Image (cartoon, rainbow, N blue to C red):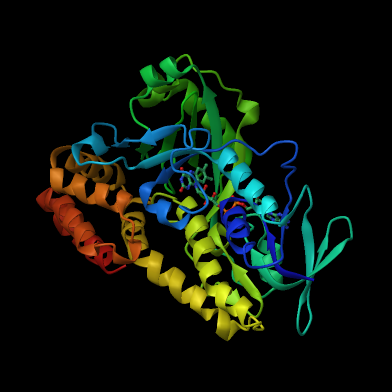
Amino acid sequence: MYDVLIIGAGIAGATFATKISKYAKTLLIEAQDYKKEIPIRTNVFPEHNHPFIKEEIDWDDNGIFPCLHTKSNYMSDQFNGVIDSTEFGEPLGNICYTENLLRELINQFEQQGGTFNSNERISKINRHSDYLELINNKGESYNTKLLALATGSRGFDLQQSLGFDIPDHYTGALIHLFGNEDKINENLEYNYVFHINPKISTNGPFYFNKGKERIATGFLGKKNESKQEILDKLDRILKNYKHIQPIVDGLKYDLKTAVIGEISKHPIKSFSRDRVLVLGEAAGIVTAFFYEGMLSGVACADIATNTLKPLLEKNCIFSQLELQKYDKEVKRILFSYFKNGNSLEYLIYNEGSHVKSLWRLYTELLNENKLARKYIYEAYINHDLSKHNTSNDRYVGEKWFGKLSTLSKITLSPKFFKAMLL
Ligand SMILES: Cc1cc2nc3c(=O)[nH]c(=O)nc-3n(C[C@H](O)[C@H](O)[C@H](O)COP(=O)(O)OP(=O)(O)OC[C@H]3O[C@@H](n4cnc5c(N)ncnc54)[C@H](O)[C@@H]3O)c2cc1C
């Protein structure tokens, strides 16, 4: 019998395993074969993630964080809205080689006595009165007092079988481009590029995350686009889309390595039930506009550990009532920050004819307004997101609205008004 069993060794599950195994007999199960290879990921890892993982990970570890994140470019067809940390102080955060971060977390977990089973998929969960029984694809079973679902967008069947809702999910494409460090720096000045073009997608950005000798790029597909259509579009964009040609120029990539997968957002109503917690993207805890999910992975892991620690000491039964603190804390710590993403999503991710010009004005605003840039910078480096200042977001929204033509102001004022209330 395990105290805690975690399904999924992504950022949420691996962080939680490392943290909770200090207090509980823990088993971590991952469907992918991590012993063979942990798939590479190059992610933006803002400074505001740091407090949730500072005890486990050395912020100066170059294997995990090969470069500082100093420059973000919110890019339109006409403007570069650049947030350059050197204008204000410390870096925006780090760029993360997530496969190395996961490896380090799992190593620590095993050193602390945790058991890690990779290449093993949980296919069924049976509830008993005082424990849960999990059955894997080989027919083996495990018993646990508490279960954590950290299955991202790949475990919805299990989630539903336990009575949880599932979040909205969208299909996206991801590929890595490779070159030597000099070439990468010559092609791309920014650590992170976030570009909106409604012709590419009305659901999300085309983005670049720059590592040392590799760049991750991709986009989210439109509704109803098939995986093949998304892949074909990625091919066309990388070959022909003029805005990004200088970035792609001379870098190597193999379209066969592109990953087409789901990403979820819009948090489900409840993240806990008797003896079960849902962590990270599985619960849809991903910011709605920028699709930040590493934050919720580390935050959910930290909050779940703080919730469970006293319950483990008191030998509690992990009832929904006892676990409710987890839901409350996730909402308290993350959701004021999430409001900004909800508003931007409402204004930009739709089929409206105004989207392109609105995004152009937003990037122009960042280009010319230092205070708007400073407020975005402050959100990146904020070590207490529960105190995120929503009036700063409102300031940016008002200045953005102020840039509209008189006619657009009349047409779009109800939308801006509603966005402020989300
Ligand atoms: C293309 C792309 C780029 C992104 N870039 C960024 C970024 O730069 N910064 C950022 O903050 N966020 C980014 N995100 C979002 C972020 O990466 C994810 O939200 C986050 O990694 C999700 O972590 P997770 O641990 O919740 O889920 P996952 O990483 O999806 O992990 C879930 C794990 O559970 C395993 N699993 C599922 N079902 C089972 C089962 N039945 N049995 C066993 N194992 C199972 C899966 O194999 C998987 O490894 C990006 C997302 C995408 C799609």
263 left or right of 125?
A: left
What residue sits 49% from the left and 66% below the top?
Answer: 267
**Closer to us: 264 or 374:** 374
376 left or right of 228?
A: left
Picture quadrant where residue 29 is located:
bottom right
**Closer to us: 57 or 46:** 57
Q: What is the quadrant of the C terminus in the image?
A: bottom left
Q: Is residue 82 visible?
A: no
Picture coordinates of residue 174 (x, y %)? 55, 37
Picture coordinates of residue 206 (x, y %)? 43, 37
209 left or right of 176?
A: left
Residue 246 position (above or below residue 35): above
Picture quadrant where residue 336 is located:
bottom left
Count up the numbered dots.
0
What residue sits 57% from the left and 73% below the top?
Answer: 309
What residue sits 41% from the left and 25% below the top?
Answer: 241
Q: What is the quadrant of the N terminus in the image?
A: bottom right
321 left or right of 376?
A: right
Picture coordinates of residue 403 (x, y %)? 13, 47
Q: Most extreme residue toward the right, as rendered? A: 139
Q: Is residue 90 visible?
A: yes
Picture coordinates of residue 211 (x, y %)? 46, 30
Picture quadrant where residue 37 is located:
top right
**Closer to us: 2 or 324:** 2
